[in-house]
Amino acid sequence: MTRRIMHIDLDAFFVSVEQVENPQLKGKPVVVGGRPDRRGVVAAASYEARAFGLHAGMPLATASRLCPQAIFIVGNFAKYRDASQRFMAILADFSPYIEPMGLDEAYLDVTGFESIHGSTHQMAQAMKQRIKDELGLCASVGIASCKVVAKVASELSKPDGLIEVAGGEERSFLTPLPTAKLPGIGKKAEQALKGLGIVTIGKLSTTPLNILKSHFGVSGEILYRLANGIDDRKVEPSGAAKSISRETTFATDIQHRPQLEATLRYLSERVGGELRQQDKQARCVTLKLRYSDFTTITRRHTLGQTADSDQIIFDTGLKLLKSALVREKRSVRLIGIGVSGLTEARQLDMLDSSAHRREQLNKAIDRIRQKYGFTAIQTGRTLLLRDIFPEDDGDYTLHTPSLSR
Ligand code: TTP
Ligand code: MG
């Protein structure tokens, strides 16, 4: 089966996060990086600012000279890190094979997952829409059979773009582009190639390998392969998941509290099971609700001590749910629970026998469920789900089972 790889990169990331918080900044030349009278460089520039020649890495003083009307913002990294985590969590809902490349960029191997959405194109559109709805940000997406072509495609599609390169079209897609569009070719390499009369990727792809090797050493071969759209690098999920979440959309919007709580209990147990499966402990619990009018909220609680038990995840989620629903008139369309801030399982504190008992109980339940299915053991609350969701092969069939990790 040919691979389908997506490269997703947020547009003008730091600036866009600032614009979500302060919509008056939208449509204006905005720079994040610091005040123009300070030393330092541009970290991010809005596309309106780029029209004046501003770009990342440019000294702030130069930026201010080229575009005196630009609005300069110091920036707040914690805010961008938070947005980044939420961005990655959305991507992880589409495929578990995710390789973050930075705060605002990731590769996704979506081979085989596209059928859920109709096609890779529709999958990318759904992804972009969720990023827009939930984060207010624009993402650009490239889809191809390998990483390098997917990356070039997403760059080329910016801003708010989507380019899919069909299998077999990799070379013809790359051919007309300037060499600088290939990842890894900076100003120096671009000039060196120009000196050899190589300006386009097409020309690079037909330059004899020995000529490239004699000028660029081992990198010559890499250049040659990339220019020909040959790239078998895998999407490598960077070790373990950063968060684990489960969510479900109800067949009809729900206001009935016991049903919401039962579903939350079920999802908490699924998250807890996965957490223990990975031998992890979690620091944060996040509740997600989407109301009937599609407004989506998330509420997070940081635990005093890391935990991996269903009960703690559920109790925390339930508190968040109760406080979110105070005076809430809208019914609930989707509910989800997740854990983050994952660490390796801590050595049990043997003095705490209740924690020890809870751990033994959780492990026993996990073992039975692995063998006989989730519904083999029911806690009081999830029994209610029997009347709501059809049971199938030892599990409840949720309306939209989540792919999130
Ligand atoms: P990029 O994705 O390279 O840039 P961008 O998201 O601002 O714009 P584009 O639409 O072209 O993708 O980098 C992501 C963020 O990383 C960027 O918003 C700010 C930060 N960054 C720096 O702090 N310094 C830098 O030199 C670069 C390139 C980025
Ligand atoms: Mg970006």
Image: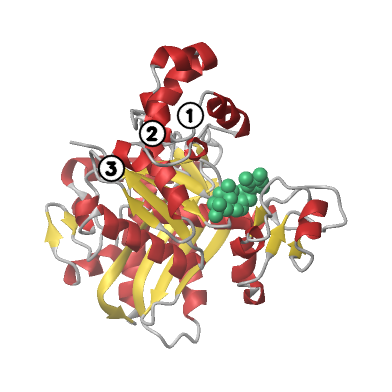
Which residue is at the front of the view, 292 or 398?
292
Q: Is residue 125 left or right of residue 192?
A: left
Whole-angstrom CA distance, mark 3 to mark 1, is 30 Å
Residue at disc 2, CB closer than 8 Å to ligand 1: no
Q: Is residue 21 above or below residue 12?
A: below
One can see residue 318 in this view: no
Mark in front: 2 vs 3: 2
Using a 10 Å C-alpha cutoff, classify the residue at mark 2 as few (fewer than 14 neighbours), some (14 to 19) or many (20 or more): many
Q: Nearer the viewer, mark 3 or mark 1?
A: 1
Say which mark, if any, is on residue 4: 3
The Cα atoms of the two marked residues, 1 and 2, are separated by 9 Å
Taking the image as shown, residue 378 lies to the left or right of residue 18, namely left
For label 1, being within 8 Å of ligand 1 is answered no
55 sits left or right of 350 in the view: right
Q: Dot 1 surroundings within 10 Å: few (below 14), some, or many (20 or more)?
A: some
Residue at the location (51% across, 43% down)?
Answer: 342
- Calculate the distance from the C-alpha at mark 2 to the C-alpha at mark 3: 23 Å
Query: Where is mark 2, residue-wise?
Result: 202
**In the rendered structure, which amino acid carries the disc numbered 3?**
Arg
Q: Amino acid at mark 1?
A: Ile
The residue carrying mark 1 is 198
* Residue at (23, 67) in percent of width and height: 385
The answer to whether residue 286 is visible is yes
Which of the two residues, 251 or 72, is positioned nearer the viewer here? Answer: 72
* Label 2 with label 3: CB-CB less than 8 Å: no
Instruction: Name the residue located 48 percent from the left edge and 75 percent from the top edge.
Output: 322
SS of the residue at dot 3?
Answer: loop
Q: Image point 63% across, 57% down: which residue? A: 14
